[in-house]
Image (cartoon, helix red, strand yellow):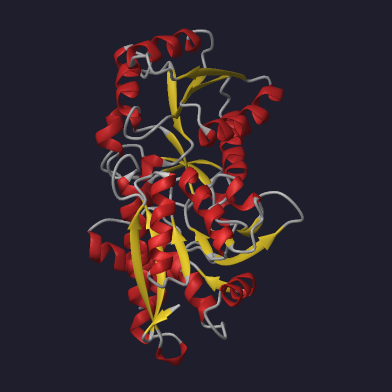
Amino acid sequence: MSRGDAIVLGGMGPLSPPGIAWAGRELLAGMELAVQDFNVEGLSGGRRLELLFEDTHGDPDAGVEALGRLHAAGACALVGEFHSVVANALAEEADRIAMPFFCSSATLDAITARRSPYVFRLAPPQSHGWKIYADFLLAQGFRQVIEIIHEDVYWTSGAEVIRRQLEPAGVRVTRVALNPEDSAPTIAERAGAFAAAESRSIALLLVGYPQPLEPIVLALADHGLLAGALALGDPAGRAIFPDWWETAGEHGATASFLSYQLPGRLTRTGWKAATAFYERQGREPSFVALEGYDTIAVLAHALERTPDLSAESICAALRAVTAPGTRGAVRFAVEPEGAVHHQWAWPPVCITARGDSGRPLSKADVLWPSNHALRLLDRSLISRAEWLAESD
């Protein structure tokens, strides 16, 4: 729907607990920047974009209620969300009411495996990204993986991807499940007992953030496990957020995490957006902010090709679009079955580590694959120096 000459889009993301508020703020900041960029010149017919953004609190029920409010306010499409359990509920509801939903940053396979004609996704499915993380663990020679895990659908799905990849290769995968009565020191003691059995061990932090991740990391450190005996991993990629250092401290400096952005390499569109983001926010955008930007940018390109704002027209335009994004050209793939349905295949995926709290994201260490291999993935990705040289 439109309001006057404005095309109304409904944005979604966690802006308050129990959701990861930094994730919602990054999505919102990226979306707002893209709306501003596309409104400078306007879409065809002089139309402009208007973004209404709702806080999902990281809660599925709150997300569905917010979707209803946005739909009633005239939003023609739903965009955003970071938490997979919320996005999965939104996908189900969007399919029920025939409303286009372009999921920005949630990875649970079920979101697109439902194969709805109304649901599209920018971030890779969990089975794709977490398999790459498992490949990294094999390449690094880890002999034991300790899953410190809150057993819900998101974490158990990801853990199963890693287990299927590692166990046939002879890697021991051990689960330390969180129970309500367990204290953080108890969790650390259990993890430490397993870590002592192998010289190359890593603990995957498959728990909520910042709580209970923070006390668990502190307890692991207090038990002397982070002084070389045990590495830390965060496949969910939350080490990109500025409050990671408040949560994990320097203990998390070398934690390996999935990134859907190659450090220091973006497209020309990406460097333009990143520069504007820095001018607004005083810091580099995370890949979640870039996902927010790309979601609006891709949808705006699709809207230029729609005869009207019906759900069918918008979805048909998205299926046909190829749009320049910050991390590559975005087009949607469909495979005969499974989670690759209206899916960008593929955004760049690598394993990185921040190294220290003062290091910007663009300088993060690339742990897997090699920098040379990453450059071969997409020739449109360039360094900031190359972009500046072109701009002179």
Which residue is found at the position 53% from the left and 47% from the top?
107
Which residue is found at the position 39% from the left and 18% from the top?
180
Position above or below: 164 against 334:
above
- Determine the residue located farthest toward the bottom in the rendered image: 45
Position above or below: 215 against 276:
above
| Image coordinates for residue 392, horizontal then vertical, percent | 35, 78
Instruction: Tell me how many marks there are.
Output: 0
Decide which of 310, 157 is in the foreground and name it: 310
- Asked whether residue 266 appears in the rendered view, the answer is no
Position above or below: 6 against 62:
below
Q: Is residue 135 left or right of residue 69?
A: right
Which residue is found at the position 40% from the left and 90% from the top?
46
| Image coordinates for residue 38, horizontal then vertical, percent | 39, 78
| Image coordinates for residue 19, horizontal then vertical, percent | 35, 43
Which residue is found at the position 44% from the left and 41% from the top?
237
Position above or below: 157 against 345:
above
Quarter occupied by residue 230 = top left
| Image coordinates for residue 379, horizontal then vertical, percent | 57, 64
Quarter occupied by residue 49 = bottom left
Q: Is residue 335 left or right of residue 209?
A: right
- Asked whether residue 157 appears in the rendered view, the answer is yes
- Determine the residue located farthest toward the right in the rendered image: 336
Q: Is residue 95 left or right of residue 53?
A: right
Q: In which quadrant will I find the N terminus?
A: bottom left
